[in-house]
Amino acid sequence: MKSFRSHRGILATLDRANVDTDQIIPKQFLKSIARTGFGPQLFYDWRYFENGKSNPDFSLNDPRFKNAEILVARNNFGCGSSREHAVWAIRQYGFEAVIAPSFADIFRNNSFKNALLTIELKEAEVGEIFQMVERYPGLEATVNLDEQRVTLHLPEEISFHFAIDPAVKERLVHGLDEIGLTLKKEKEILAFESSHDCQMALARKGFRQRP
């Protein structure tokens, strides 16, 4: 899994609360489990009209947000059904982090497993970011996981501190998925397997290990 320490990118805003996973990646795109190719389908029903043309009123279609890599949204982002495809679509669209006042638990957990950093800030802080993005087109921010800080690169920089579970932080910083975490115990696993193999060999020969 890709590690995450610090990232600077353009901010894009999605001024909606309770964005559910069916809107993040509609159900008709869930046929594949290849973990690739979902970026174009992100927010598909909002980004496009039924005839396939781009909806100019949807915020992510705003030219200001072209190549944005940090998404800012409102409360309860990622609610609804559990689908890891939602995180895949956000990552493959190009977002490295999502900032919101709150996230659905399952979406948050799926995000950490796929190197997508979810950052919870106070509603007032998120509101301030929305205001600054409107005021400064193309506004960039740096998300620093080591310092647990979001910095807006304004004429006078503004920073916001965020909390994160230490275990999750370690996983993201070192790029450890479930397999990576398991391999950290590789020596212990090999020692156990070696001991187990010896016991099985003795058992086959009719010996018993003393208690």
Image (cartoon, grey):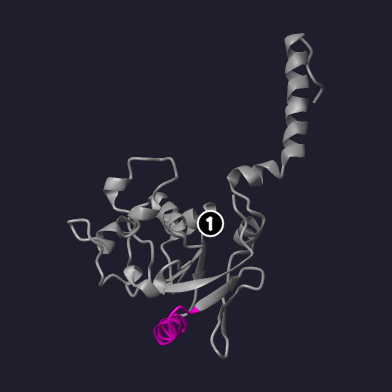
Whether residue 21 appears in magenta in the rendering, the answer is no
Whether residue 133 sits left or right of residue 169 in the image: it is left
Whether residue 66 sits left or right of residue 166 in the image: it is left
x, y (%) of residue 168? 60, 59
The residue positioned 65% from the left and 47% from the top of the image is 181
On the image, numbered disc 1 is attached to which residue? 112
Which residue of the protein is positioned furthest toward the bottom in this rendering? Answer: 156
Read off the magenta span.
Answer: 123-139
Q: Main secondary structure of the magenta part?
A: helix
Which residue of the protein is positioned furthest toward the left in this rendering? Answer: 51
Secondary structure at numbered mark 1: helix
* Foreground residue among 59 and 197: 59
Name the image quarter holding residue 131. Answer: bottom left
Q: Amino acid at mark 1?
A: Phe
The residue positioned 46% from the left and 74% from the top of the image is 11
Whether residue 169 sits left or right of residue 107 in the image: it is right
Name the image quarter holding residue 44. Answer: bottom left
x, y (%) of residue 169? 62, 62
x, y (%) of residue 207? 79, 12
Whether residue 194 sits left or right of residue 123 in the image: it is right
* Foreground residue among 31 and 64: 64
Q: Quadrant of the C terminus?
A: top right
Whether residue 127 appears in magenta in the rendering, the answer is yes
Q: What crowding class fits label 1: few (fewer than 14 Cα within 10 Å), some (14-19), or many (20 or more)?
A: some
Name the image quarter holding residue 63. Answer: bottom left
The residue positioned 44% from the left and 45% from the top of the image is 36
Vertical side of 109 occupied by 155: above or below:
below
The residue positioned 35% from the left and 68% from the top of the image is 60
x, y (%) of residue 88? 44, 52
* Foreground residue among 33 and 10: 10
